Image (cartoon, rainbow, N blue to C red):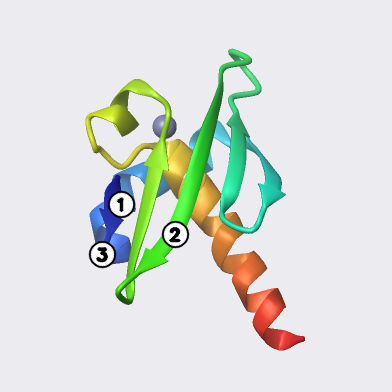
């Protein structure tokens, strides 16, 4: 699990996500499949909130080492958008 603190902490991952532009598929709220369109590599990202803190996990190598990867950054962007849409209803 990677704790998501501030946007600055995952800034590098966000920058990479903007460059790679992976495809994010929503499985359900909090569960995403991120695909690198260039390599076809697919990883599962989970986002959850516990004790008011946001966490994410990714099945890629960096994610297993608890490093914020661009898969997490891409999924978190989709997650926040989804949460915002849900809150608006
Ligand atoms: Zn990853």
Q: Mark 3 vs ligand 1: CB under 8 Å?
A: no
Q: Position of residue 49 (x, y in %)?
A: 40, 66
Q: Which residue is mark 1?
A: 10
Q: In the image, which is nearer the foreground, mark 1 or mark 2?
A: 2
Residue indicated by mark 2: 48
Residue at the limit of the structure toward the right, as seen here: 89
Looking at marks 3 and 2 on the same chain, the residue that comes earlier in the sequence is marked by 3
Asked whether the viewer can see residue 16, the reply is: no
Q: Whole-percent x and y of residue 17?
A: 48, 40
Picture disc at residue 5: 3
Q: Is mark 2 within 8 Å of ligand 1?
A: no
Position of 57 relative to 64 (above/below): below
Residue 43 seen from this side? yes
Choose top left, top right, bottom left or bottom right for residue 58: top left
User: Which residue shows up at 54% across the image and 48% down it?
Assistant: 75
| Number of residues whose C-alpha sits closer than 10 Å to that of mark 2, classed few (under 14), some (14–19) or many (20 or more) | some
What distance separates the C-alpha of mark 1 from that of mark 2? 16 Å
Query: Are circles 1 and 3 on residues that touch, CB within 8 Å?
Result: no
Where, quadrant-wise, is the C terminus in this rendering? bottom right
């Amino acid at each position: 699990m990677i704790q998501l603190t501030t946007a600055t902490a995952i800034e590098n991952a966000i920058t990479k996500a903007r460059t790679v532009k992976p495809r994010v598929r929503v499985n359900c709220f909090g569960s995403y499949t991120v695909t690198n369109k260039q390599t076809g590599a697919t990883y599962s990202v989970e986002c959850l909130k516990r004790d008011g803190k946001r966490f994410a996990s990714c099945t890629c190598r960096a994610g297993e080492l608890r490093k914020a990867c661009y898969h997490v950054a891409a999924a978190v962007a989709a997650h926040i958008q989804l949460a915002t849409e849900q809150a608006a209803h």
